[in-house]
Image (tube, coloured by chain):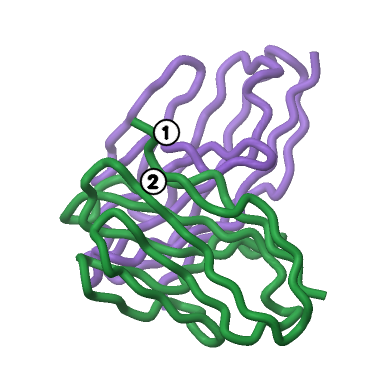
Amino acid sequence: EDQVTQSPEALRLQEGESSSLNCSYTVSGLRGLFWYRQDPGKGPEFLFTLYSAGEEKEKERLKATLTKKESFLHITAPKPEDSATYLCAVQAMDNFNKFYFGSGTKLNVKP
Amino acid sequence: NAGVTQTPKFRVLKTGQSMTLLCAQDMNHEYMYWYRQDPGMGLRLIHYSVGEGTTAKGEVPDGYNVSRLKKQNFLLGLESAAPSQTSVYFCASNRRDGETQYFGPGTRLLVL
């Protein structure tokens, strides 16, 4: 069964304190892994797509990496405006139309 | 471009009432999706459509119906609302071949 697990559920950081969020997945064949940011009361906003193990993508203070079993979202020197829920989703090779989402990591960055 | 829009933003229903949620996109996307988001459970796919006039069931389709009469619109219907359908509903769309999904702002539904 295709499955996505994110950890931790919640993370509190001081401004400038770097950390990583984890997304582990079980899928028959991975076509793509997606990271989204979701602010309270809003829809998910796309951040990155990763397609193969070893791939890395960066955007400002965020860097996403991918292995055969998990992905990490590294946050370097976070700021309070990085506070949000970060969602991970996987797309399987055998059905492009279905995306399996994790329950998210709620990040709170304190000034 | 407005992207993906959803109507209404918030609604309160009584058990047994019916309603329709509207999703519209102006990006000429082929694929459209309806998800529900509940605390601690992540986004779960209700129904999806790969083109005008086509729909398919997702992970949690029971109690919902959908229609895609026009390419830009995807409607989600609740025929007889139940408290278990209290949730936040998100619509999403993307181009062919499963590219990145773009989400609407969500509809908060409370069923009493």
Residue visible at 31% across and 79% down?
Answer: B56
- The residue labelled by disc 2 is A34
x then y, percent, for residue A59: 41, 20
Mark 2 is surrounded, within 10 Å at the Cα level, by few (under 14), some (14 to 19) or many (20 or more) other residues, namely many
Mark 1 is surrounded, within 10 Å at the Cα level, by few (under 14), some (14 to 19) or many (20 or more) other residues, namely some
As measured in the structure, the alpha-carbon distance from the residue carrying label 2 to the one carrying label 1 is: 7 Å
Residue visible at 48% across and 40% down?
Answer: A36
- The residue labelled by disc 1 is A47
Pointer 2 with pointer 1, Cβ within 8 A: yes
N-term-proximal mark, 2 vs 1: 2
Chain the render paints purple: A
Residue visible at 59% across and 73% down?
Answer: B19
Task: Chain letter for mark 2, please.
Answer: A
x then y, percent, for residue B59: 46, 78
x then y, percent, for residue A78: 63, 17
Judged from this view, the residue extending furthest toward the left is B97
